[in-house]
Amino acid sequence: MDERPEQRLTIRLDLGAGIRVGPGKIALLEAIDTEGSIAGAGRKLKMSYKRAWDLTEELNKSFSDPLIAKSPGGSHGGGAQLTAAGKALVKHYREIEQASHKASQTSLKAVTNLL
Amino acid sequence: MDERPEQRLTIRLDLGAGIRVGPGKIALLEAIDTEGSIAGAGRKLKMSYKRAWDLTEELNKSFSDPLIAKSPGGSHGGGAQLTAAGKALVKHYREIEQASHKASQTSLKAVTNLL
């Protein structure tokens, strides 16, 4: 059969006012959800703690409610969890990704045929 | 009504073997189609001639048939046109973009409500 790896769509949401959400931020939110801390999420994604922290600050400022709830702790300490808004963003992003992929099958196949 | 600019999806196609097609390359192909040259397309997109040229070389190598037909000319000269394959890629990319946007309306609205 076809030995090429499956073709994928990557989605970036441009939400206006410079707010953009793509696969990197969604992966960070998912990693915070599973790891329970920003430091742990950063390690999982091989992202510096500073980079992960800055992205959580950016995400929290971009939406009405914070997406990530941070608990106090020492340096690089303290836990972090997704809020209801954070979980909703991840859920809807993944829905958009799946709906887009499904709706694009015919055209994506046509692109593949050009390879 | 809602004064926010319309939310948009940006699509990147990951086609395997490191071949990626996103809005930048598609804009370049469309500009070559309207401007008739790589230099003209670069000017239109405020992209250096070298950058535009390198992207056309990358695109031409990535697909079975070249996407851009280049005519000989002097330095920065010569015209360029999209081939049938080049036109097909642009067409299918825009189809994917539209189908994805349409299929994602409900979830995209849900994301907007989080802003």
Image (cartoon, coloured by chain):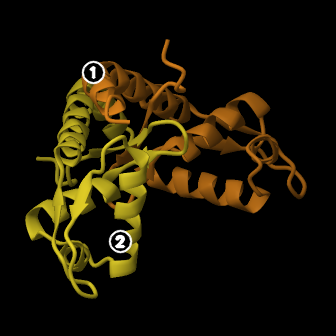
Chain colours: A orange, B yellow
Q: Position of residue A17 (x, y in %)?
A: 33, 61
Label 2 crowd bin: few (<14), some (14–19), many (20+), radius 10 Å: some
Label 1 crowd bin: few (<14), some (14–19), many (20+), radius 10 Å: many
Amino acid type indicated by mark 2: Trp
Residue B102's quadrant in the figure? top left
Residue at position x 33%, y 57% in the image = B25
Quarter of the figure that contains the C terminus of chain A? top left
Secondary structure beneath dot 2 equals helix
State the residue lying farthest toward the right.
A74
Residue at position x 78%, y 33% in the image = A35
Task: Locate residue B94 relative to residue A92 in the image: left or right.
Answer: left
Residue assigned mark 1: A103
Residue at position x 54%, y 45% in the image = B18
Secondary structure beneath dot 1 equals helix
Residue B42's quadrant in the figure? bottom left
Residue A33's quadrant in the figure? top right
Residue A11 vs residue B42, the one in the foreground: B42
Residue A17 vs residue B81, the one in the foreground: B81
Residue A97 vs residue B22, the one in the foreground: B22
Task: Locate residue B97 relative to residue A83 in the image: left or right.
Answer: left
Residue at position x 19%, y 34% in the image = B95
| Residue B32 visible somewhere in the drawing | yes
Q: Position of residue A90 (x, y in %)?
A: 51, 31
Q: Position of residue B80 (x, y in %)?
A: 18, 67
Residue assigned mark 2: B53
Amino acid type indicated by mark 1: Ala
Mark 1 or 2: the one toward you: 2
Exactly how many numbered labels are in the figure?
2
- For disc 1, the chain is A
State the residue lying farthest toward the front.
B72
Task: Locate residue A4 relative to residue A70 in the image: left or right.
Answer: left
